[in-house]
Image (tube, coloured by chain):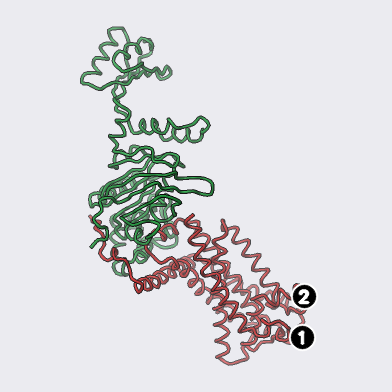
């Protein structure tokens, strides 16, 4: 029996505003998340990703707009929302002094499971998250990766229909990251709706069906990774000119293949231009270069990455006075 | 591999009976959690074990020799009920620190994202602290008996005295929960807690009769809840209680006054704590 009313929309956000004092953290965020899908929320630090998650998870009250999670209004019926969701925040929300197992049992009991049910569920999750060996040691002694795994396990105790993951892999070791990916894929296969924020574009590209880009308190783009990339148009044709060959000549030749002028980076000896990709393009470029006596170290055609999309979307709005944010964007692009 | 089908039963919106049973169950679960935390950090038990012993011995043998009580009554007999009052005050600062730490830690976010009772977190804390307070009461009673303090009344009066101690401690814990939520850092809570404890206990009749204080201070001390508690305990244990001659209502009726202070604190601070818990965590 579900109260979900067969709704196809798991999360609906309309005109969401959230203020902290005078500071408007969210300025009318809008998006919808279809049930059973994975939505990746991208955005620089301070863009409003975590604030959005906290509102959706009933930890913060919105100051404006309408937010429905699992068909329930987060303001009018937070209890119903809480029965449908799981949350894993950026910092492991665990009781340091209790063993991992007791943490999970405690959360099961608080989520409304019976004693025996909570114990069985804890054992199941410990096994699944590769924590059986450490299960009866206090969390105090856990490594960062173990904490994050236990934290994710904790958010799954009550088998939520909608799971919020706030930067689930930030700072994780490869082993924990792989466990995380595996769990995410299993969850998706079982129909759980996933809402994850991340700073890793590659991760969003791999995991998410849809991506919402949040910047400065607004959702500035919403679509599939492919749709977002198509915003940038075709591909980039990029060559690396060997030392001794003339960059300007190479740029002229390359310009003949693309739309617009080729750009030159004389330091790295990269020359690139936007092109409409077609078969044998790279071969033709190499031939044309050889004919005019230009030697190439490399020639490649690159489809735009989400990094390019992200920079294109947020870069337009980045003011020159906002040095810190530029630094964040630069860090994100690496 | 596990499947993540929705758990049956969790979908149903709970009725009020279910809500009450959930609240009781949440409180039990969280009381246990807080007890585990206290016991796994033995240093946090110093407040309720070593501190009362050391203070009792200091006052009994260092300070006490210089304190002359009217009619030559035994200072040790006078002191121990005051020590009970002092220990309740100092142990309660632990509540403030624990609540403050929880608020700073992400675990409160986890609790708040669960379909659990809102009051359970705070109720679990105050009940767990009440149980650790019992440790302090036992330690202190043993120390008192060792230095010559005696109960001069019957079992019923003594039981009433211990009940009064715990009621007062429980009420004070709610006030301290509020304090723990108002402060931004654990250090702030600790420092303010110690200052408050010193002020409350020294400007009271816990260690010395208020009659020797300047008039303005004497009035403060006479109406200090700890003075009422100390006087009530002295009366119930049958220990010397010079305060009964003081012309202040709480000291004339110390047992009733202590109950009033305790109930008053619960009525004011329990709802305030729940309110603070909501606003501090959902800003």
Point 39% across, 48% down: residue: A166
**Quarter of the rendering containing residue A39:** top left
- In the picture, the disc for residue B70 is 1
Chain on which label 1 sits: B
Which chain is rendered green in the image? A
Chain on which label 2 sits: B
Residue B4 position within the rendered picture, expressed as x and y whole percent measured from the top left: 25, 56
Say if residue A154 shows up in the picture: yes
**Quarter of the rendering containing residue B214:** bottom right
**Quarter of the rendering containing residue B227:** bottom right
Query: Do circles 1 and 2 both sit on a common chain?
Result: yes
- In the picture, the disc for residue B213 is 2
**Foreground of the two, A318 or B167:** A318
Nearest to N terminus: mark 1 or mark 2 = 1
Residue A247 position within the rendered picture, expressed as x and y whole percent measured from the top left: 38, 12
B26, above or below B113, in the image: below
Q: Secondary structure at mark 1?
A: helix
Whether residue A258 sits left or right of residue A98 in the image: it is: left
Whether residue B121 sits left or right of residue A290 in the image: it is: right
Image colour assigned to chain B: red
Q: Secondary structure at mark 2?
A: loop
Point 51% across, 33% down: residue: A322
Say if residue A334 shows up in the picture: no
């Amino acid at each position: 029996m579900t109260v979900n009313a067969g709704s196809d929309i798991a999360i609906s956000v309309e005109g969401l505003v959230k203020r902290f004092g005078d500071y408007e953290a969210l300025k009318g965020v809008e998006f919808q998340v279809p049930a059973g899908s994975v939505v990746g929320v991208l955005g620089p630090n301070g863009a409003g990703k975590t604030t959005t998650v906290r509102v959706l998870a009933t930890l913060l009250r919105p100051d404006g707009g309408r937010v429905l999670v699992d068909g329930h209004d987060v303001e009018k019926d937070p209890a119903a929302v809480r029965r449908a969701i799981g949350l894993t925040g950026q910092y492991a929300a665990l009781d340091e002094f209790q063993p991992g197992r007791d943490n999970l049992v405690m959360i099961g009991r608080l989520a409304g499971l019976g004693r025996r049910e909570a114990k069985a569920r804890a054992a199941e999750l410990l096994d699944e998250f590769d924590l059986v060996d450490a299960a009866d040691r206090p969390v105090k002694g856990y490594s960062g990766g173990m904490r994050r795994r236990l934290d994710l396990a904790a958010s799954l105790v009550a088998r939520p229909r909608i799971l919020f993951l706030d930067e689930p892999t930030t700072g994780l070791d490869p082993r924990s990251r792989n466990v995380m990916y595996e769990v995410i894929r299993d969850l998706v296969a079982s129909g759980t709706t996933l809402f994850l924020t991340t700073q890793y574009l590659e991760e969003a590209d791999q995991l998410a069906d849809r991506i919402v880009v949040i910047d400065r308190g607004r959702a500035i783009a919403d679509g599939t990774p492919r749709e977002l990339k198509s915003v940038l148009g075709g591909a980039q044709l990029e060559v690396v000119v060997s030392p001794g060959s003339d960059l300007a000549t190479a740029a002229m030749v390359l310009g003949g293949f693309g739309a617009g002028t080729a750009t030159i980076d004389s330091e790295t000896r990269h020359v690139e231009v936007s092109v409409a990709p077609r078969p044998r393009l790279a071969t033709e470029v190499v031939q044309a270069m050889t004919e005019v006596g230009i030697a190439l170290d490399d020639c490649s055609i690159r489809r735009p990455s989400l990094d390019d999309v992200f920079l294109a979307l947020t870069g337009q709005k980045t003011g020159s006075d906002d040095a810190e944010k530029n630094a964040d964007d630069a860090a994100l692009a690496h | 591999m596990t499947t993540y089908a929705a758990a049956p039963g969790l979908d149903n919106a709970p009725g009020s009976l279910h809500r009450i049973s959930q609240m009781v169950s949440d409180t039990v679960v969280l009381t246990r959690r807080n007890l585990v935390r206290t016991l796994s950090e033995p240093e946090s038990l110093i407040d309720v074990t070593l501190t009362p012993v050391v203070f009792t011995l200091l006052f009994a043998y260092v300070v006490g020799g210089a304190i002359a009580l009217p009619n030559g009554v035994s200072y040790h007999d006078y002191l121990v009920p005051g020590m009970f009052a002092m220990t309740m005050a100092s142990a309660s600062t632990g509540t403030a620190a624990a609540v403050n730490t929880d608020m700073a830690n992400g675990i409160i976010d986890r609790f708040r994202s669960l379909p659990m009772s809102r009051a359970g977190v705070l109720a679990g804390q105050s009940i767990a602290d009440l149980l650790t307070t019992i440790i302090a009461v036992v330690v202190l009673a043993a120390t008192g008996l060792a230095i010559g303090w005696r109960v001069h009344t019957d079992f019923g009066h003594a039981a009433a005295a211990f009940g009064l101690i715990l009621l007062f401690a429980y009420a004070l814990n709610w006030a301290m929960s509020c304090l723990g939520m108002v402060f931004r850092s654990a250090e702030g809570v600790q420092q303010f807690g110690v200052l408050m404890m010193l002020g409350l206990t020294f400007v009271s009749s816990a260690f010395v009769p208020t009659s020797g204080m300047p008039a303005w201070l004497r009035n403060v001390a006479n109406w200090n809840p700890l003075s009422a508690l100390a006087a009530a305990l002295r009366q119930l244990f049958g220990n010397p209680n010079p305060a009964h001659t003081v012309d202040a209502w709480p000291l004339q009726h110390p047992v009733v006054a202590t109950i009033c202070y305790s109930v008053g604190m619960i009525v004011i601070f329990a709802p305030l704590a729940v309110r603070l818990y909501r606003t501090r965590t959902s800003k």
